[in-house]
Amino acid sequence: MREPVYYSGSARFFDTHAHIYDRKFDAENVTTEDILLRCKASGVTSVLIPADNESTSRTAVEMANRYNGFEGVTLYASCGVHPHEAKTYTEDTEKYLRSCLETREELRIVALGEIGLDYYYDLSERSVQRDVFEKQLILAYEYNVPIILHERDATGDCLDILRRFYKDGRLRSLPGVCHCCSCSKEAASELVKMGFYIGFDGPLTFKNNKKTPEVALNTPWDRIVIETDSPYLTPEPNRGLINEPCHVPYVCKKLAEIKGVTIDEAAQITYDNGRRLYGVN
Ligand SMILES: [Zn+2]
């Protein structure tokens, strides 16, 4: 059934975006221990668990703390409210996020996210999405943390907001990462100019996707991180299987091909980039 893990060399990988608490894992009888065991087997030594609302922020923090170090895998968390969930954002949510950011070191929180705009699904009203995005950008600047940006079919409005924050000096010099980048290469290079890192995952490996490899080719090496966005977006050749951090070497392999380096070199660079992005050792 499951393909053996792809990578057996000595490089280390950092999956900078994996929702390993997702209910889909329970539904497929995959335990967190299984996930971390397979991480170890495939050289994935660091994983960031991102949140999308208050409840998953709590779960991400809880998991990162409970399982950190299991099978030698270092875990980090983020807290934040995804554009899908923008309609749930209240003053209490903001209080909660503030309390997280105040104690982020002991909670293993290294970023605020996912935050941003999603006009593809439109699960929250667009004006509400923009408002909640701006509120969280203010928090990120105030607490000096990088953001995990989620942007889908909303590049124009997203860049407008970020440009305004950038011009006003309310973005960090390292503002965060454009996760699961799906924008044009022009938009990606504007984000890079503002200091953003760009995150690539399964879609980079999809055969019909010509755009994302071009964005990767065009993005400077020191700004690229790799991710799985588990449990969805499983990379080739494992599409159809539930996605896990152990699949991140496939993304790295594709990136290495695009950039004309070895997978070990690509692993080392993206590993170092992930640590610099999130300010961890
Ligand atoms: Zn995600």
Image: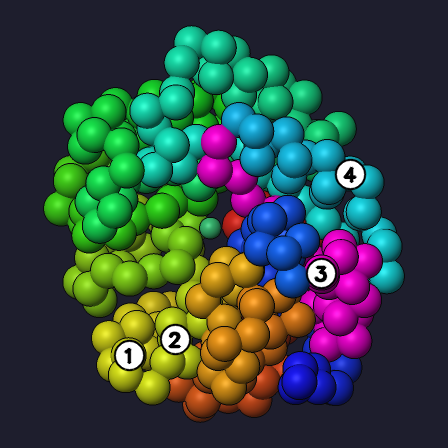
The mark nearer the N terminus, 4 or 2, is 4
Q: Secondary structure beneath disc 1? A: loop
Which residue is under mark 1? 209
How packed is label 2: few (under 14 Cα within 10 Å), some, or many (20 or more)? many
Please tell me whether residue 31 belongs to the stretch shown in magenta. yes
Residue topped by disc 2:
204
Single out the mark in the foreground, 3 or 2. Answer: 3
Query: Could you classify mark 3 by the number of other residues whose Cα lies within 10 Å: few (under 14), some (14-19), or many (20 or more)?
Result: few
Q: Residues within 10 Å of mark 4 (few under 14, many from 20)?
A: some
In which image quadrant can residue 166 be found? top left
Q: Which residue is mark 3?
A: 29
For the residues labelled 4 and 1, the Cα–Cα distance comes to 37 Å
Q: Is there a contact, CB below 8 Å, between mark 1 and mark 2?
A: yes
Whether the residue carrying mark 4 lies under 8 Å from ligand 1 is answered with no
Task: Name the quadrant containing residue 224.
Answer: bottom left
Residue range of the region highlighted in magenta in the rendering: 29-53
Q: Is residue 177 magenta?
A: no
**Does residue 274 show up?**
no
Q: CA distance from mark 4 to mark 2?
A: 31 Å
In the image, what residue occupies the spot 45% across and 67% down?
233
Q: Is residue 203 left or right of residue 231?
A: left
Q: What amino acid is at disc 3?
A: Asn
Please tell me which of labels 3 and 4 falls first in the chain.
Answer: 3
- Quick one: label 4 or label 1, which is nearer the N terminus? 4
Q: Residue 165 at what x, y percent from top left?
A: 26, 30
Which label sits in the foreground, 3 or 4? Answer: 3
User: Quick one: label 1 or label 2, which is nearer the N terminus?
Assistant: 2
| Amino acid under disc 2 | Leu
The residue that disc 4 covers is 65
Query: Disc 3 or 2, which lies upstream in sequence?
Result: 3
Percent coordinates x, y for residue 100 in the rendering: 61, 22
